[in-house]
Image (cartoon, rainbow, N blue to C red):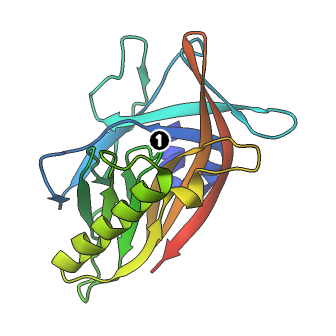
Amino acid sequence: MTAAQDLVNDPLGFMDENILVVKWEGDQSNPIDRSHHSVQLYTLPLTKARGYRRNWRHSPLDVYFMAPTGALLSATAVADPHPFDVFFCPFHVDSTLGSVLTNAARLMFTTQMDGCSFGVGSKASTGERLVFHANAQTGNDTSAAMTSAQDRALRAAFLSQGTHIHGILGPVDYRPSRKNTEYAATTFGIRNGNNWTFHTQRFSVEASGNAWVYGWKEVKQFAEL
């Protein structure tokens, strides 16, 4: 099987053994995306991107990138031949954008998080869920101020849709470490029947010459409904 098939068949297993980077920002003009999207996984040469597990061995890990089907990241990118469908919660600076999750796809992703907040709404009577990705960068000169502004934006966004908040993943949940490393995160959802679980993959990002080096920290669940 290819990497994309492994991800679709066993999302948690794949995210435990690989690093997945999502730079795609989605449809920024649409406040709430109600469709699902065809995406592909891509790899880059080790001279451009490489990964490792943040343990004492620094075991090497494969790094994959996600983008819309057919949208090559660069001339050196190699696309996995098996596209698949996902829900995608879009991102834009100083915006709160959302996506409606139904049973039309099994997986949900959003843009790489490195200071943003992600909110999960309660289950609607129809079985749908609403999620939002919030960024409040401008005018907030501290992490605490940014987080507070994003929390307010999420509550206002869910309230405007008549939906309660079930859970929030904020910077304090994925950014800090005991060694002062600031982690980024790939946040994703998995549908099982009529239920969703939401998880985040935490990893460090460092520049090394012309390459980006990603250090896998952990995958943890932060919401279930």
Q: Is residue 195 visible?
A: no
State left or right for residue 206 relative to residue 134.
right
The residue located at (24%, 52%) in the rendering is 95
Camera-nearest residue between 16 and 158: 158
Camera-nearest residue between 221 and 155: 155
The residue located at (70%, 50%) in the rendering is 177
Q: Considering only vertical position in the picture, is 165 above or below 135?
A: below
Q: How many marks?
A: 1
The residue located at (57%, 61%) in the rendering is 173
Which residue matches tag 1? 4
Q: Considering only vertical position in the picture, is 225 above or below 206?
A: below
Q: Considering only vertical position in the picture, is 194 above or below 52?
A: below
Q: Considering only vertical position in the picture, is 50 above or below 150?
A: above
The residue located at (38%, 35%) in the rendering is 23
Image quadrant where one finds the C terminus: bottom left
State left or right for residue 124 relative to residue 74.
left
Image quadrant where one finds the N terminus: top right
Q: Is residue 95 visible?
A: yes
Spot occupied by residue 16 in the image (x, y as percentages of width and height): 65, 50
State left or right for residue 21 relative to residue 154.
right
Amino acid tagged 1: Ala
Spot occupied by residue 34 in the image (x, y as percentages of width and height): 17, 61
